[in-house]
Image (cartoon, grey):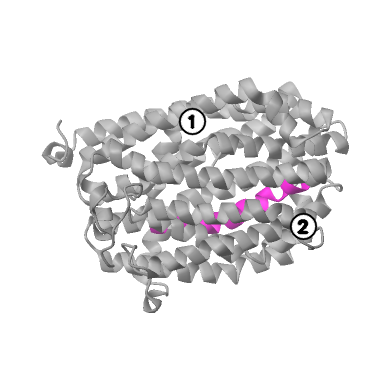
Amino acid sequence: MSPHLHHPAPVPPSGAAPSGTTSANAADALGTEPVGKMLWRLTLPAIVASTVQAIYNIVDRLYIGRSVGTDAMAGLSLTFPYMMVLAAFGVLVGAGSAAVLSIRLGQGRKDEAEKILGQLVALKLLFFFTIPVVAYLLLDQTLAFFGGTPQAIPYAHSYLSVILIGNVFSHLAFGMSSLMRAEGNARHAMTAMLIGAGANIVLDPVFIYGWLGLPAMGLKGAAWATNAAMACSAAYAFWHFRSDSCVVKLRLSRIRIYSSLVGPVFAIGLSPCVHAFVMSVIQIAYNKSFVHWASDMVEANLYIAAAGIINSVIQFGIQPAFGLMQGVQPLIGYNYGARKPRRMLKAFKLAMGWSTLACCLCTLTAWIFADPLASVFTKDPALHRTIVWGLRILSAGLPTIGGPFISSTYFQSVGRASMSLLLSSMRQVLMLLPLILAMPFLFGVKGIWYAPPTSDVLSSAVIMLVVWHELRRVVRSPAYLADTSLPA
C-alpha cells in the first residue's frame, strides 16, 4: 500500500541547465554545476510533475467516492494490480533507458543515446500490441483471482476495459519524460506531466458527470479522461524530441530495437520492473487477505476501498521522495559515466537526507490531518473511520524509507542492476509479503494493516547497512582518490 533520467537552444533558469547555457550544455551541467544546486534544479520539476500526477489520482477517487460510492471505490482499488503489471513493462524500458542514456551522455557517446531514445519508442509500441491485448482477454478470469468482491468487480471491469485501449499513450508519455530528465531537461519533463495531469483534472468531471452535453459515464468516464490526458502528454513529448530544445534527437530512422543496447536497458530496468510486479502481488495479497479475515464481504469491501484511498494519500505525501529519485538519477548516472565519484556520492547523500526529511513530514501531516483528509473522500461514517485509523497506521513507518528509496536508485544509476533489484525487493518481497500473510494470525484483520510499517522499519535497517558498506568502498577506491571534481 505504501510503496513505489541536437541543436543549441536557450534553456530558461528554471530548467535543468543554468541560465545562459544551451541545450547541448544541459547534459554537461550535470558534471560541472554545484551538486546541491543541480540536484534541486533536477528535482523540483520532477516533484511538481509527479505531485500533479498524484493529485489527479486523488481527484479520480474524490469524484468517484463522493458521487458513485464505496463499491466503486473498491472497484477502482481492484484495478491497481492490473495497472502495476502494465507499469512494470513500462519501467522495464523507461527506467532502464534513462539510466543507460545518462551514462552514455557522461561518456560522450551521443550517437548511442539517440539509439536508446529510438529504441524506447519502438519497445513501447511493441508492448502496446501485446500486453494490453492479453490483459483484456483475461480480464474476467483474473479480477476475481485478484481478490475482488462481487460488488467491486463490475466497476473494475468497466474502468479497465477502457484504460487498456489508451495504455500506449501513458507508456510513451512516462517513458519519454524519463529520458527528458536523463538528458538534463527536467523542466520539459515536468511540462509533459503537467499537460497530462491538467487535462485529466479538467476532463474527469466532464466525462464522469456528463458535462457539456456528454452522457454521464461514471467510473468509465474517469478512464476515458485518463486516456485523453495521456495522449496530450505523449504528443508534447514527441514534439520536444523533434524540436531544437532537446539534447538527444528523435530520428525516425532510429526507431527500432538494437541488439547491443536492449540487453543493458533491460538489465538496469529489471529492478524497477520487478518492484512494480511485486507491488501488484502485494495488492492482490492485501485484497485476498481482507476477504479472508474480514467478518463478511461488506467489511472486506470497506477495507479494500479504504486501502485504495489511503494509498493515494500516502503516494501524494511522498512525492518529494519520488521526485528526488527521478532528479538524482541523471546526476548520479552522468557523473558515474564521467568518472567523477565525489560528485556522484555528494548527490547521493544529499538526496538521501532530503528524502528522509520529506517522508518525516508526510507522517506528521498524516497523523495531524487524518480526519479532515478522510472527510474529503467520503460521507460514509464507517469508511471515514477506517480511513482515519488506517492512514495513521500505514504512515507510521514512512520516516525510515527515504534513504532506501534513493539507495535503490543509486545502484540502478551506476548500472549495478542485481544490487538495485535486491534492495528494491527487500521491503516488498522479503519483508512485507510474509508479514501480510503471517500477522493476521496474531492480530486478526488488524494485522494486515500493521504489516507495512513493520516492513518499513525492518527492511530499512538492512538496506542502510548495505549503503554504509557501499560508501566505504567508494571512498577507498582509486577513482575517488584521483577525482578532483570536489575537495576531499
Q: Which residue is mark 2?
A: 211
| Label 1 SS | loop
Which residue is at a point 58% across and 24% down the rendered structure image? 365
From the viewer's perspective, is 222 left or right of 301?
Answer: left
Check whether the beta carbons of the residues at disc 2 and disc 1 lie within 8 A of each other: no
On the image, the x and y values in percent for residue 202 come to 65, 53
Q: Which residues are magenta?
A: 75-97
Residue sitting at the far bottom: 253
Which residue is at a point 60% across and 34% down the rendered structure image? 314
Q: Which residue is mark 1?
A: 401
The residue closer to the viewer here, 168 or 456, is 168
Which residue is at a point 41% across and 64% down the rendered structure image? 240
| Label 2 SS | loop
Looking at the image, residue 16 lies above or below residue 117: above
From the viewer's perspective, is 91 left or right of 332?
Answer: right
On the image, the x and y values in percent for residue 318 come to 52, 35
Residue sitting at the far front: 212
Gap between marks 2 and 1 measured at Cα? 42 Å
The residue closer to the viewer here, 12 or 454, is 12
Quadrant in which residue 3 is drawn? top right
What type is the residue that disc 2 sits on? Trp
Residue 54 is a magenta residue: no
Point out which mark residue 284 bears. Answer: none
